[in-house]
Amino acid sequence: METIAVYWESRIKTYGFQRIPELALIELSCPISVIKALGDILTSHDMQGLRASFILAQGSDRELSFVFCLPEREGMGFHAHLEQTGMPTSHRYIYPVGIIFFHGPHFGDRYGIAETTFSAISKEGIEIIASGCAASSVYLILAQDDLDRAEQVLTKTFEVAK
Amino acid sequence: MEKVKLGGMKQSLELCQFDLRGQDSPERIVPRVSKLLASQKINIAFLTYNKLNNESHQLTILLNQCDFTRSSELLNTKGTLPRGWAMQSRKHVGILTVYPHRNPLKILGCVMVLWAAQSIPIYGIATSLSAISFITDYQAIDKGIEVIQNSFQLPDDHAPIKPELIYYQSDEVKRGKGN
């Protein structure tokens, strides 16, 4: 069944903005040939207590580059555990970062959401460290100090459904 | 051994993937590309953006497969991308989204192990509220679903995995009989 939706919104509606401050960002690259080994590490007992607030992976040049955002203490533990396995090399460790995330009706099914979000953030001169938009949600990873400004500009740009 | 529980699973429509990589002016790439696509009413079904280990930045976007040709033409038009940015594309991909009941890190690791054992490729991953989305070949999605169904426990009454409703955004309002 196909449904054709017509959105006539002066401001795009969202269900509100959530923020997660005080996170560590760990980036690592893994050759695709050893992706199974990284999967084994992530399923190991030592990793099970870790709560990742956000994860993304991008493929390029036969590698997958991962970003993990975790609370600082867990990030340090995650980083140390990866070092012990001798597996992928951590390339970046950034602290503190924060996440702003939000979702709304039919995000991912309709055009214009990404343009509205990233244009507003870019106009404010806020640097986006990483981002993931999937399954109706928009996740922005920013420097901790930029969270307030980002939330202000997004609140002006989008309408929060009441 | 008790299977790990999942809250559910969902697959996307058939999509295409564009990976844009470059070093210069990374702050411009996402606004510029998203604005261009929105001006042509092209929906971005999935997006990731990050800095890679070689100082380049990468923007990955997934669009409907039917938008591949005109999106390729738009993005390949001279002057669209900042100087030094290159583009690679891949047709016929799809997203499989799993909804962890608990332990998303473990489920992520399990899917990586299981799919690697079956040579099911992973072209990208992103998590969101209660969900983990995996990009793979569209033709491999059924196999990916089968592998996950065999290894995880889904609720008896879980929602359909394949999309039953397809949403399109339109500017036109068509009136039928009786309206």
Image (cartoon, rainbow, N blue to C red):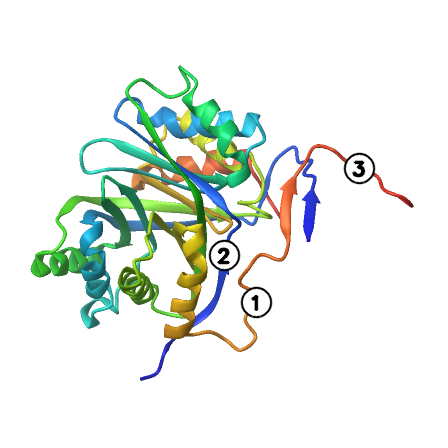
User: What's the distance in space between the residues labelled 1 and 2, CA to CA?
Assistant: 11 Å
Query: Does A76 sit left or right of B160 as displayed?
Result: left
Decide: is B163 above or below B70. below
Q: Is residue B50 above or below residue A161?
A: above
Asked if labels 3 and 2 touch by Cβ distance under 8 angstroms, the answer is no
Kind of element beneath mark 2: strand
- Residue highlighted by disc 1: B159
* Residue under numbered circle 3: B174
Q: Amino acid at mark 2?
A: Gln
Residue receiving disc 2? B11
Question: Could you tell me residue B47's position as x and y percent?
Answer: 42, 41
**Residue at mark 2 shares a chain with residue at mark 3:** yes
Crowd band around label 1 with a 10 angstrom C-alpha radius: few (<14), some (14–19), many (20+): few
A35 to the left or right of A126? left
Q: Residue at x 44, y 53 (%)?
A: B139
C-alpha distance separating marks 3 and 1: 31 Å
Q: How many marks?
A: 3
